[in-house]
Amino acid sequence: MTIQLPPGPKAEGIAGHARYMTENQLGFQLDAMKTYGDVVRLRFYNRVAYQISNPDDVHKVLVEENDKFSKSPIYKILLSRFLGNGLLTSNGKFWRRQRRLVQPAFHHKRIQAYATTMTNYSADMANTWKDGEVRDLNQDMMRLTLNIVAKTLFDVEVTEHASAVGDALTVLLVETTNATQGMIFVPAWVPTAANRRSKRAVAQLDSVVNHIIDERRASGEDKGDLLSMLLLTQDENGESMTNRQIRDEAVTIFLAGHETTANAMTWTWYLLSQHPEVEAKLHEEWTRVLGNRAPELQDLRQLEYTEMVIKESMRLYPPIPFIQRQALEDTTLGGYDVPKGTLVNIGPYLLHHDARWFPDPERFNPERWTKEFEKQLPKSAYIPFANGPRVCIGNSFAMMEAQIILATLGQRYQLRPVSAEAPIPEPHLTLRPKDGIRMRLEARQVRSVPDARPVATELA
C-alpha cells in the first residue's frame, strides 16, 4: 500500500526545519502554506509534523473527529512541569471531570456578575495613569488582567504579587517555547540554567497560589467563586480534591485567564494608534452609548463597533498563534495519509492571514465583521479561542473583559507608540510583542471623568 505524503520544504541536516522555526516561526509557516498548500510536511529532528491551514481540515481535527487526536505530548511533558495536571495539560476522563467541575464558574450568568469588578479595576488603572507618561502597555495589561482574574475567580487581591506571578508565567512561556522549537528536552533534574529558572518560577507560583488556598481552607467560607467550587467538590467516591489538584487548576486559570486577554489588548492599543479613523469611530460609539460614564453590563450589547475592533485585532494577532495535536490512529487530512503518532500543527495565525477567508488579510479592517460576513466564513476559519470540546473555557469571560477594558481606558486616554518601528510579534504559547510596547498616554478632552467605582448593576 502506497502512503500519500504531503509536500514540504527540504529538511536540512539532523535538525530539519527546527532552525527556521527558531529564527522566524510566523514567516516560515506562512511561506510554507503559500508555497506548498494546506497540508505541509515538516520535520523537527526525528519528529514529523503536518502543518494544516484549511478550515475543513482544522474543523475535522478539533471538532468532528477530535477523539482521534490528543493534546500534543510535547506540550504536556513541558507544561506539566509548571501547571501539573490541570485543564491545559490533562487528557481523557480526568480532563472531562475537571472541565465539568470548572465550567460553572464561566456560566454566562456568573460571568455577567464579574462586569462591575472588571470596570472597577480598569478605572483604577486609569486613575494611576498620567497625561504624557510613557508606559509599557503589555506589562500594564498583564497586571490588570491578572488582578481581574484573581478577584473574580478567587476573590483575592494579588496586586502586590502581580509582578512575581507575571514574571514566573513569562519564564514558563519562554522556556516551553525554546524547548518545543528545538524539540530537545532536558530532564527537569538536570541543573541547566533553563531548569534553574523554571524551578524558581514554580516556587514563585506555588508560594502565591498555595497561600490563597490555605487561607480559604482555614476560613471554611463558601464564597461561591471558582476556588470554593474546587475546595467543596467531591468525586463519586466522596473524596475531595487535594491541594495539589486545586493548585494545578488555579495556576492554569491564572495563566490562561490573564495572559491571552492582556496580549489581545496590547495589540489592540497598538493597532488603534496606527489607525486614527478607527479610533475616532470608537470614540463616537462610546460618546453615543456611554456619554461620560464608565461602561456597565447592559451597555455591552450596544458597543458593537468595540466588539468588531477586538475581533479584528485577534484576527491579525491571535492570542494563541498555534495549536498542536497528535494523531491517535491512522487517518487522512486534505487527501493525505496521516500515520498514527504524527504531530498536527494548526495555525490560527495562518488561517486568520489567508486571503481566501479574509480579503486583504494584512489590513486592519474592523468593518469586515458584519453578521453576514461571519455567517459565510467556513467553520474553524476564525479560531482565536480554538474550537471543539477543548475550546477556551473562558472565551465569553475574555470577550466581555476586553470590551470593558477598552471602553473604560479608551474614554480617558489615547495611546501613542514611542518608537516608529513596528513591534515584533513573538510566538510563545501566546503571541506577545517582543520586548513589550512602550506607549505615551494622551489624556482625552472630555467633559467629565467616568467614576472609578460605578454602582453595581442589578442582574435580571
Image (cartoon, rainbow, N blue to C red):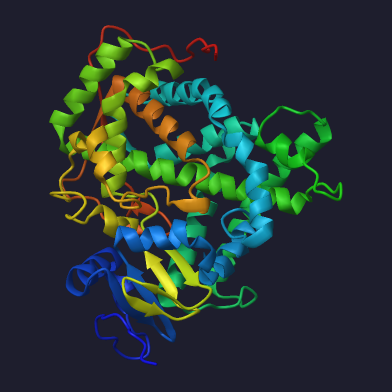
Q: Position of residue 448 (x, y in %)?
A: 31, 7
Q: Position of residue 121 (x, y in %)?
A: 48, 25
Is residue 363 in view from this perspective? Answer: yes
Q: Quadrant of the C terminus?
A: top right
**Along the viewing direction, whichever of 356 and 179 lies nearer the viewer:** 356
x 33%, y 79%: residue: 42
x 71%, y 48%: residue: 246
Residue furthest to the top: 447
Is residue 199 in view from this perspective? Answer: no
91 left or right of 166?
right
**Along the viewing direction, whichever of 236 and 384 lies nearer the viewer:** 236
The answer to whether 112 is drawn above or below residue 45 in the figure is above
Q: Position of residue 390 (x, y in %)?
A: 52, 53
**Along the viewing direction, whichever of 123 and 395 lies nearer the viewer:** 395
**Along the viewing direction, whichever of 453 and 107 lies nearer the viewer:** 107
Q: Give the quadrant of residue 222.
A: top right
95 left or right of 67?
right
x 51%, y 47%: residue: 256
The answer to whether 394 is drawn above or below residue 16 in the figure is above
The answer to whether 50 is drawn above or below residue 398 in the figure is below
Q: Quadrant of the N terminus?
A: bottom left
Q: Position of residue 303 (x, y in %)?
A: 32, 22
